C-alpha cells in the first residue's frame, strides 16, 4: 500500500494502526479507528479491549503465539460499527504493532470461523505430537507447557478426568488429586443434564462450545475445544482445551448495552423535544383560546342570538377537551424510567448495576425529601446520572464513586456525581462524542443548571441543580 493509499484509508476510517513499546505504552496512534486506545504515553492495557491481556502480550513477545487476533469488536462511543484488531510483534524494533480495520457483515462470522479452525489445528497438532512421543509423561508435560494459560483436561471414554493441568486446578480451586477420576459432568455442574459432554461431541469426537462455570457466586465463561486422541496409535482419550472468554463476553455485552442506551437516550431526547414544542404551541394556544371564548360569550350578552351562544359554548367545550387530550399526550411523552415516588429506588438500582459491572463500590446519598420526588425533574436527573456513571465506567477507571441527591426546603433538586478517576479537559472532547452535550441539553429542558469540573488525576464532578416547578405555569397547564 502506497503512502497516499494509506492516508486515504486512514481518512475514511477504514483502518488504523498503533505502535506499542516494550513497556506496553502507546508510542504512536494513527487513525480515528484507534480512538478507543489510550493517549500516547499511557498503557495499552488501560483500554477495555486489552485490559487484563498482559500475559498474551508477553506470550506474543516470547514467540509462544504468532499474533493476538480480535474480530467483531464494537467499542461505543468510540466506534459503533464492528472492527477487527490484529496485534503482532516486531523483534527488530522490539515493539508491538496493532492494526485495526473495519469489519463488514459476514466478515465477523468468517473471522470467528477462521479463528476456530486455527484453534482446532493447534489442538490437532498437539495430539499428533503427543502420539509421536515415546512416553505419556512427556506428552502431558508438553501439554502443560504449551497450554500454561489455558485449561487442559484429558478424559477417558467414560468422560472421567485422567489429567488436569495446574491452571484448571487453580480455576476450580481444588488440587489435582481430588479431581482425577471424577466425571466431567460432575466436575462442571453448570452443564445442563439435557446436554452432557457425551451428547455435545459429534460422531468423529470433535466439539466446540461455550460453557458457564459458576464458582463462589461468580460466573466464568469457558470456550471448549474437544477432540479424540485415539487415532494413529495415540492414547485412547479425549483432550479438552478451554479458554477463558469472560472478559470478551463482558466487553460485547457492555458494547451492546451501550448501543442500546444511546438509542434509548436519543428516543427520550426526541420525545422531550416534541413535548416541549407541543407545550409552547398547541397547549399554550388552547389555554389562550378558552378565556377568549368565555369573554366573547360575556360580551355578547343575554340579548345575543341563542344559536350563537350555543356555538360559543360548544367551541369552549371543544377547546377544553382538546386541552385535556393535549395534557395527556404530554404526560405520555414525558413518562420515562422513574415512576412517581420511585426516584430513590431507581437510583439504588442504578448504583447496584454499576457496582456489579465494575466492581467499584458506589456510595449513594439520597435525602428523604429527594427519595420520593417524581415527575419530569426526576426523570431527567435519572438519565443524567446514568450517563455520568457510564462515562465514569468507560473513561475514568476510578476506585471510588459517589452519587448524592438532595431536595432543599425550596424544592430545588440537586444531583452530584463525583469520582476519583482520570480527569480530562472538557474543552478537548473529541467531535462525535455527545454524552456531555446530551446531559447539558437535558438539563436545559427543565431549566436546570449543569456544571462539570475535571482536574487531571483528581477526578471529575458533575453537578445539576433543578429549580422547583413554577407554580403559575403548573396552574395554567
Image (cartoon, rainbow, N blue to C red):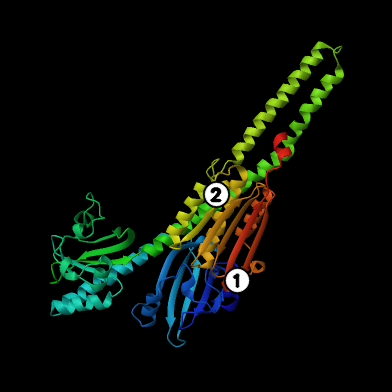
State left or right for residue 187 relative to residue 335.
Answer: left
- Across and down, in percent, residue 302 comes to 85, 13
- Across and down, in percent, residue 321 comes to 68, 25
Judge whether residue 433 can be spotted in this image: no
Q: Which mark, residue 328?
A: none
- On the rendered image, what quadrant is the C terminus found in? top right
Q: Which of marks 1 and 2 is in front?
A: 2
Nearer to us in this view, 315 or 447 = 447
Residue found at the very far bottom of the displayed protein: 92
Q: Is mark 1 on a helix, strand or loop?
A: helix
Label 2, on which residue?
Answer: 264
Q: In this view, does 208 lie above or below 68?
A: above
Q: Residues within 10 Å of mark 2 (few under 14, many from 20)?
A: few
Question: Residue 320, located in which quarter of the rendered image?
Answer: top right
Q: In this view, does 6 lie above or below 82?
A: below
Question: Residue 353, located in which quarter of the rendered image?
Answer: bottom left
Q: Is residue 373 above or below residue 159?
A: above
Nearer to us in this view, 299 or 362 = 362
Q: Which of marks 1 and 2 is nearer the N terminus?
A: 1
Question: Residue 138, located in which quarter of the rendered image?
Answer: bottom left
Determine the CA span between mark 1 and mark 2.
34 Å
Nearer to us in this view, 148 or 189 = 189
- Across and down, in percent, residue 385 comes to 56, 55
Q: Which mark, residue 8?
A: 1
Q: In this view, does 446 lie above or below 315?
A: below
Residue found at the very far front of the displayed protein: 409
Q: Residues within 10 Å of mark 1 (few under 14, many from 20)?
A: few
Nearer to us in this view, 441 or 338 = 338
Q: Is mark 2 on a helix, strand or loop?
A: helix
- Across and down, in percent, residue 265 comes to 57, 50
Q: How many numbered marks, from 0 up? A: 2
Amino acid at each position: 500500500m502506497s503512502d497516499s493509499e494509506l492516508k486515504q484509508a486512514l481518512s475514511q476510517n477504514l483502518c488504523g494502526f498503533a505502535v506499542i513499546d516494550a513497556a506496553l505504552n502507546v508510542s504512536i496512534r494513527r487513525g480515528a479507528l484507534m480512538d478507543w486506545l489510550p493517549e500516547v504515553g499511557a498503557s495499552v492495557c488501560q483500554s477495555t479491549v486489552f485490559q487484563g491481556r498482559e500475559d498474551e502480550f508477553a506470550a506474543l513477545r516470547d514467540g509462544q503465539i504468532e499474533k493476538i487476533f480480535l474480530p467483531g469488536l464494537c467499542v461505543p462511543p468510540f466506534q459503533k460499527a464492528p472492527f477487527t484488531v490484529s496485534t503482532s510483534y516486531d523483534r527488530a524494533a522490539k515493539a508491538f504493532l496493532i492494526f485495526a480495520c473495519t469489519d463488514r457483515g459476514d466478515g465477523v462470522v468468517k473471522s470467528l470461523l477462521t479463528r476456530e479452525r486455527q484453534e482446532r489445528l493447534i489442538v490437532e497438532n498437539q495430539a499428533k505430537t503427543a502420539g509421536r512421543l515415546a512416553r505419556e509423561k512427556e506428552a502431558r508435560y508438553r501439554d502443560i507447557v504449551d497450554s500454561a494459560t489455558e485449561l487442559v483436561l484429558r478424559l477417558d471414554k467414560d468422560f472421567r478426568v485422567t489429567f488436569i493441568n495446574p491452571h484448571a486446578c487453580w480455576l476450580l480451586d481444588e488440587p489435582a488429586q481430588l479431581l482425577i477420576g471424577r466425571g466431567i459432568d460432575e466436575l462442571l455442574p453448570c452443564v445442563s443434564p439435557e446436554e452432557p459432554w457425551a451428547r455435545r461431541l459429534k460422531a468423529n469426537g470433535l466439539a466446540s462450545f461455550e460453557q458457564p462455570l459458576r464458582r463462589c457466586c461468580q460466573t466464568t465463561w469457558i470456550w471448549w475445544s474437544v477432540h479424540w486422541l485415539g487415532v494413529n496409535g495415540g492414547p485412547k482419550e479425549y483432550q479438552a482445551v478451554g479458554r477463558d472468554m469472560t472478559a470478551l463476553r463482558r466487553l460485547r455485552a457492555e458494547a451492546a448495552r451501550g448501543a442500546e442506551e444511546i438509542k434509548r437516550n436519543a428516543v427520550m431526547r426526541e420525545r422531550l423535544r416534541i413535548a416541549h414544542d407541543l407545550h409552547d404551541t398547541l397547549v399554550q394556544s388552547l389555554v389562550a383560546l378558552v378565556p377568549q371564548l368565555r369573554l366573547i360569550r360575556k360580551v355578547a350578552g343575554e340579548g345575543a342570538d341563542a344559536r350563537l351562544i350555543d356555538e360559543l359554548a360548544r367551541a369552549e367545550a371543544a377547546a377544553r377537551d382538546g386541552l385535556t387530550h393535549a395534557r395527556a399526550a404530554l404526560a405520555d411523552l414525558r413518562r420515562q424510567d422513574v415512576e412517581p415516588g420511585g426516584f430513590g429506588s431507581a437510583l439504588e438500582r442504578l448504583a447496584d448495576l454499576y457496582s456489579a459491572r465494575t466492581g467499584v463500590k458506589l456510595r449513594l446519598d439520597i435525602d428523604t425529601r429527594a427519595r420520593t420526588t417524581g415527575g419530569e425533574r426526576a426523570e431527567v436527573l435519572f438519565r443524567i446520572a446514568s450517563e455520568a456513571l457510564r462515562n465514569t465506567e468507560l473513561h475514568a477507571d476510578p476506585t471510588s464513586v459517589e452519587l448524592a441527591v438532595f431536595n432543599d426546603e425550596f424544592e430545588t433538586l440537586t444531583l452530584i456525581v463525583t469520582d476519583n478517576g482520570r480527569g480530562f479537559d472538557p474543552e478537548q472532547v473529541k467531535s462525535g462524542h455527545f454524552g456531555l452535550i446530551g446531559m447539558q441539553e437535558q438539563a436545559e429542558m427543565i431549566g436546570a443548571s449543569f456544571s462539570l469540573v475535571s482536574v487531571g488525576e483528581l477526578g471529575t464532578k458533575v453537578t445539576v441543580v433543578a429549580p422547583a416547578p413554577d407554580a403559575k405555569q403548573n396552574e395554567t397547564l
